Image (cartoon, helix red, strand yellow):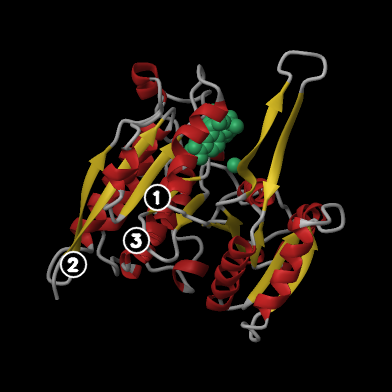
Amino acid sequence: MSRESYRIACIPGDGIGKEVIPAGQTVLEALAAAVGNGPGGFDFRFTKFDWGGDYYRRHGSMMPEAGLDEIRDMDAILFGSAGDPDIADHITLWGLRLKICQGFDQYANVRPTRILPDIDGPLKRCGPKDLDWVIVRENSEGEYAGVGGRVHQGHPIEAATDVSMMTRAGVERIMRFAFALARSRPRKQLTVVTKSNAQRHAMVMWDEIAVQVSREFADVKWDKELVDACTARMVNRPASLDTLVATNLHADILSDLAAALAGSLGIAPTANIDPQRRFPSMFEPIHGSAFDIMGKGLANPIGTFWSASMMLEHLGQPEAARVLMQAIEAVAADPALHPRDLGGKATTAEVTRAVCDRIKQPPDAPSAPPPKGGAAGGRGVRQPVQP
Ligand code: NAD
Ligand code: MN
């Protein structure tokens, strides 16, 4: 077996992105050394791109005009955050993150949510097994298609539109992706999130296409839920959900709610996938630049590590993905290693070191028995506090 050498574009971007992405790189390097050595192993070749707010201040754009060509041949992209205190959010978002997502037609945005061992979530009646979701977000059109305009700017008759654009091809491909993902999970269950009571054109087409695509997936149980009712169901009956599919805007909001219900925005990962693999897919924590803590070394890097684990799955390294996920769970289970967003005092560097140490431990070291139920269901692996 030949060794794989994965070319990874690292785009830290702004704010705490500049702290968590180097941490992610450190952890991936530790993983390549521990799991990827030997024949049939793997390593990484990282290339860093300094695109974002600072680049904008120097060049007047968030990334070079032909920037996509610089990363087109990479195997994957590890992304931090776009968002600068001194630059308007629609410029940072459209100029970098959306440019990559749309340029590379990463139409499936996948956001898993679980309550990691010993994380104190806000749902008091909810055990870790009651919340295990994957939200699939349509990532290429809908409310964020960028269609619209402004007229009469500054005058009393000023008007503006943001038109949600849905295409049959776009809805079909995200439905098919979501049904297939639901089928790959043990419960084979999908909830199609909609708002076709109030939005009576595109969302009605969305519902119709869900019915059509469902016929290709007779073994997947599925139901339909209005997005507002879905928020209540996530809080009141979390165990009734498994895989969800929703539009760009609806899933954007639902997945932040999901992250908060699981304990913190600092933990939650996401993947922007081109399922056809024509282009590199992009992996990123779901949080933003976190202006209030940037530059202080306090950012929780777990969202980035979990995203890196999704990247390894996508690259075809499920064993490495599992080892990383187990290390994350072991560290999450130790309150002494909780950063500020989880109510602790640990720094980005301390959490990163703890995850690296854990990765280096041989799998059956007596101090660290593997969690019962494997990576997905494991709970409560205690790790001694790092000196
Ligand atoms: P945010 O995620 O940056 O911060 C929200 C709150 O959560 C803050 O109090 C922050 O300190 C905390 N937080 C977030 N991530 C954390 C982590 N890893 N560790 C500890 N605490 C964490 O959201 P916001 O304040 O709405 O946005 C700030 C900027 O980031 C804006 O410019 C916004 O446009 C941008 N943003 C970018 C992305 C992206 O690039 N994907 C996503 C969201 C927001
Ligand atoms: Mn969001």
Instruction: Tell me the quarter of the picture where residue 169 sits.
Output: bottom right
For label 2, the residue is 41
- The disc labelled 2 sits on which kind of residue? Gly
| Quarter of the C terminus within the rendering | top left
Callout 1 touching callout 3 (CB < 8 Å): no
At x 38%, y 63%, the residue is 277
Whether residue 359 is visible, yes or no, is yes
Q: Please report whichever mark, 3 or 2, sits nearer to the chain's N-terminal start.
A: 2
* Mark 2 closeness class: few <14, some 14–19, many ≥20 residues within 10 Å: some
Among numbered discs 1 and 2, the one appearing first in the sequence = 2
Label 3 packing within 10 angstroms: few (<14), some (14-19), many (20+): many
Question: Disc 1 to disc 3, how far (Cα)?
Answer: 11 Å
Do labels 3 and 2 touch, CB within 8 Å? no
Q: Is the residue marked 2 within 8 Å of ligand 1, measured from its CB? A: no
Q: What's the amino acid at mark 3?
A: Leu
Q: Residues within 10 Å of mark 1 (few under 14, many from 20)?
A: many
Q: Which residue is mark 1?
A: 305
Query: Residue lying farthest right?
Result: 197
